[in-house]
Amino acid sequence: MLLLRLSHWLGQTHLGIYIRDSSYAFPAIEIVHLLFLAIFAGAILLADLRLLNLGFTTQSASRVARELLPLTLGGVIGMFLSGLLMYAGGPMRYYHNPAFQVKMALFAIALVGHFTLQIIVARKDSDQVRHEALLKAGAIASLLLWFAVGFAGRVIGYV
């Protein structure tokens, strides 16, 4: 109920009305959103590929995870802010869209899972990274979840 009231309020703000009524605001925000998505998804893909021993094999998994963490964090913050602006342009349309609801639920699960995995690996020394099979399973789950988030995101416009 709180989210519904917040959505109503957001749609009636000057910013929400401007984004909704402007011919260029939403597309411009979407471009920014997609740029941050590229940074975020690229960092996740590289971190997960390293855990699967499919890339950066000359560097430790902990080093790769540590060095990609600022990109991952910056990407998700940029996506969140630009996504909030996109939501402001039509909050009730998104609020009632089942694909958007699925996307947000999957996004939350994938985000917690990926950051948990990346931070655990980043905090380890290269000699301390154990349970390689568990890390590989986590990387595969991460990639599958992010693919599902992307799929649900694409479906939003068709529901």
Image (cartoon, helix red, strand yellow):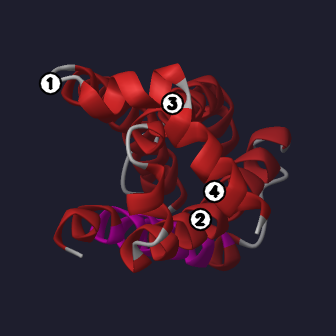
Q: Earlier in the sequence, mark 4 or mark 3?
A: 3
Residue under label 3, please give it.
75
Vertical side of 28 occupied by 125: above or below: below
Q: Earlier in the sequence, mark 4 or mark 1?
A: 1
Element carrying mark 4: helix
In this view, the residue in front, 70 or 35, is: 35
Locate residue 110, reporting x and y percent: 59, 65
Residue under label 2, please give it.
110
Which of the 4 image quarters holds residue 122?
top right
Which of the 4 image quarters holds residue 81?
top right
Element carrying mark 1: loop
Q: CA distance from mark 2 to mark 1?
A: 33 Å
Q: CA distance from mark 4 to mark 3?
A: 12 Å
Q: Which mark is residue 111?
A: 4
Q: Earlier in the sequence, mark 2 or mark 3?
A: 3
Residue under label 1, please give it.
23
Q: CA distance from mark 2 to mark 3?
A: 14 Å
Vertical side of 51 occupied by 23: above or below: above
| Side of 37 where 104 appears, left or right | right
| Side of 50 where 158 appears, left or right | left
Q: CA distance from mark 4 to mark 1?
A: 32 Å
- Image: magenta residue range: 135-152
Q: Magenta segment, principal secondary structure?
A: helix
Locate residue 67, reporting x and y percent: 61, 25
